[in-house]
Image: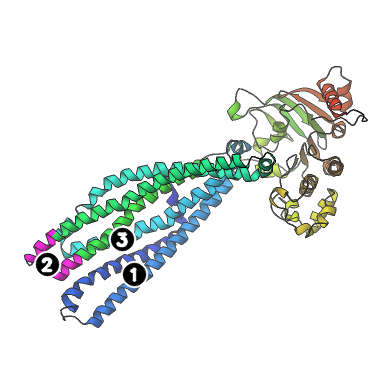
Amino acid sequence: MNPLHRLFGYSRPYRGRFIAALAAMVVYAAANAGVAYMIKPMVDGVLKGNLAFAWFAWAVMSGYLLKGIGGYFATFLMTDIGQRVVRDIRNQLFRHILDQSAGFFARSSTGSLMSRITNDVNQIQQAVSETLGDLLREGLSLVAFASLLFWMDWQLATVTLFIAPLAIHPLVRLGKRIRRTTRRSQEELEHLTHITAEAFTGHRIVKAFGAEAHEEARFSRAAHQLYRTNLKVTSTLAVLPSLMEMVGGGATLFLVWYGSRQIVAGQLTEGEFLLFVVAALMMYTPIKKLSRVNASLQQAMAASERIFEVLDTHSEVRERPDAAVLQGLRHGIEFQHVAFVYDDRVSKPVLRDVSFRVAPGEMVAIVGLSGAGKTTLVNLLPRFYDVTAGAIRIDGVDLRDLTLASLRSKIGIVTQETVLFDESVASNIAYGSSGASLEEIEAAARAAHAHEFVMALSESYQTRIGERGQTLSGGQRQRLAIARAILKNAPILILDEATSSLDAESELLVQDALQTLMRNRTSFVIAHRLSTVRRADQIIVLEKGRIVEAGRHDDLLARPSSVYSKLYSLQAFEGRRPGQVRPHPTIQ
C-alpha cells in the first residue's frame, strides 16, 4: 500500500471532524473568491459613483469575516486530527515495539527505536494536519478562483492558466529528490539519537576512562553529517518558490498582453480586467503553497516508510489463535531435545539437544563456563525466544500452545542486571502487580530485607529512585527486585546470577531474601555462589550448549574427573589469597 494512503487511513476514526474541517475550507475558499470579486464593483461602481460605499463596505467586511472564521476552524480541526493521528500512531508503534521478541531488541539500538517514535512521528504530524490542510484549503481556493475567472471570461482564464502545467514536471522530479534526501536525514538523526543515548546511559564509563572528547567527536561528526543532509533538503525546497514565481510572472505577462487588447476592443471594462489581474495573482498564492505541499508530502512519505518498516516487523514469538491459558504448575516442566540458534549466527548453535525434567517445587541450578548457554536456556522458558528445535512443556503442554500473558504471569525473574524505573519505591515493587495494597508491598519488602532502608529514604515508599534506580546501592536495587518477585508470587522463578556483583554484606542479605523467595517455588538458578548450588535438587552442567552432567552436588563431586568438580576446584582456587583461610568456593 502507498505509505500516504496507509498514513491517512489513521484519520478514518475522525471523519466527522474531517467533514467539519472540509466545510470550513469551502467557506474559506468561497469567501476568498468573493473578496476578490469585490474588485469589479469597487472600480466600476464605487469609484465612479454608481454604487453606495456602505453596501460595498458591508460586503467586503462580511467576506473577510467569513474567510477568517472558515480559516480558523479549518486550521484548528485539521491540527486536532493531525495530533490525534500522531497520538494513535505513536501509541501503536510503542506497543508494537514492546511486543517484539528479545531478538528484535538485540538487533535494534535504543536510539534507533526512540527516533522512530519521536522524530519520524513528528514528521508525519505535519503531513496529516498542516500539509493535508493546505492541500485541501488551498486546492479549494484555487478551484474557487479558477471558477471565478472562467465565469468572467473563459478565454482570458485559459490564457491565465496556460503556463501553470509547465511547472508540474520539475515539481515531481524535485519531490522525488526531497523524499530520498529526507529519508537520509531521518537516518542521520536516528544515528545522532543513538550516540546521545549511549553516551548518556554510559556516562560513568565515559567519565572513568576520560572519553568525553571521544564522545564529543562522535557526536560532532554525526551532527555535521545531519547538517549536510538537511542542507540538501533545504536547497531543494528553496528552488520551489523561485520556480513558482517564474510561472506566475509568465502568466501575468500573458494576462496583461491579452487583457489590454480586450479592453481596446471594448470586450472588457477596467474593473473586469483589474478583477482578472487581482484574482490571478491571488490564485498563484495557493499554487505556490501547493508546490510546497508536494515537498512536505514527500518528506512525510519518507518518515512513514520508516515507521511502517517497524510496524510490519512481526515478532518471531507469536501467540497462536487457539492458545490455552496456563492455570498453574501441577506436574512439572520438561525440556525435550531443545536446540536454539540466533538468526544472525545460524552456524553457531547456542543450545544442542538439551533434555531434562523439573518436578514442582524443585530447585535446578544451571552451571557452566561463560558462553555455555545458561542465560539463553532460562530465556526460553518465558518465551523471550522460541526454541529452534525440540519443545519445552509445562504440565505436558508446549509453551507455544499457551497464551504469553498467562505463561509470563506464572514466572518471576531476578537478574544480575537489576532493572528499576524512575518511579517511587512502591511503584517499582508493585510493578506488574497493579492491584497490590501498600500493606502487601511492605510485606514483600520486609521479606526481601528492604523495608529498613526504604523507611530511611526521604519519603519512604513514595521516594522516587531515579533512572534505573541510580540513587540506590547495588544491594538495595537487588532487594527491591526480589521484593517485586515476592509480591508477584509466581510459581516458577528464574534467578540469573542475582548476587554476582554484590559486596559480601549485601550478598548475605540478598541470599537470605532469595531463600525466602524460592520457598515452595520451582526455581531455575544460574548459580554464582556454591552455597546456592549445594542446596539444589539437581545441577545441570552445560558445556558448549550441551548438558554434559546432571545430578546433585555430592554426586557430581564424587565422579572422577567430572566437569563439575573441575569447575568447583577452579572456583575454589580463584577464591584463595595468600595468608587467607580458604573461603567457600563459587561456581559461575
**Which residue ends up furthest to the top in the rendered image?**
560
Position of residue 502 in the picture relative to residue 419 (left or right):
right
Give the camera-side residue of 191 and 311. 191
Image coordinates of residue 165 in percent, x first then y, are: 23, 50
Q: Find out whether residue 38 is within the magenta segment.
A: no
Amino acid type of disc 1?
Lys
Q: Which mark is residue 67?
A: 1
Q: From mark 2 to mark 1, how far is it between C-alphas? A: 28 Å
Answer with mark 1 or mark 3, whichever residue precedes in sequence. Answer: 1
Task: Residue under label 3, please give it.
Answer: 140
Answer with mark 2 or mark 1, whichever residue precedes in sequence. Answer: 1
Image coordinates of residue 240 in percent, x first then y, are: 32, 50
Amino acid type of disc 2?
Leu
Residue at 59% across / 37% down in the picture?
104
Image coordinates of residue 542 in percent, x first then y, are: 75, 25
Mark 2: secondary structure = loop
Give the camera-side residue of 131 and 180. 180
Position of residue 324 in the picture relative to residue 38 (left or right):
right
Mark 3: secondary structure = helix
Residue at 70% across / 41% down in the picture?
208
Dot 2: few (<14), some (14–19), or many (≥20) neighbours within 10 Å? some
Answer with mark 3 or mark 2, whichever residue precedes in sequence. Answer: 3
Q: Which residues are magenta?
A: 257-276
Task: Residue under label 2, please give it.
Answer: 268
Can you tell which of label 1 and label 3 is closer to the viewer? 1
Can you tell which of label 3 and label 2 is closer to the viewer? 2
Locate the N terminus by quadrant.
top left
- The reply to whether callout 1 and callout 3 are in contact (CB within 8 Å) is no
Prevalent SS, magenta region: helix
Amino acid type of disc 3?
Leu
Locate the C terminus by quadrant.
top right
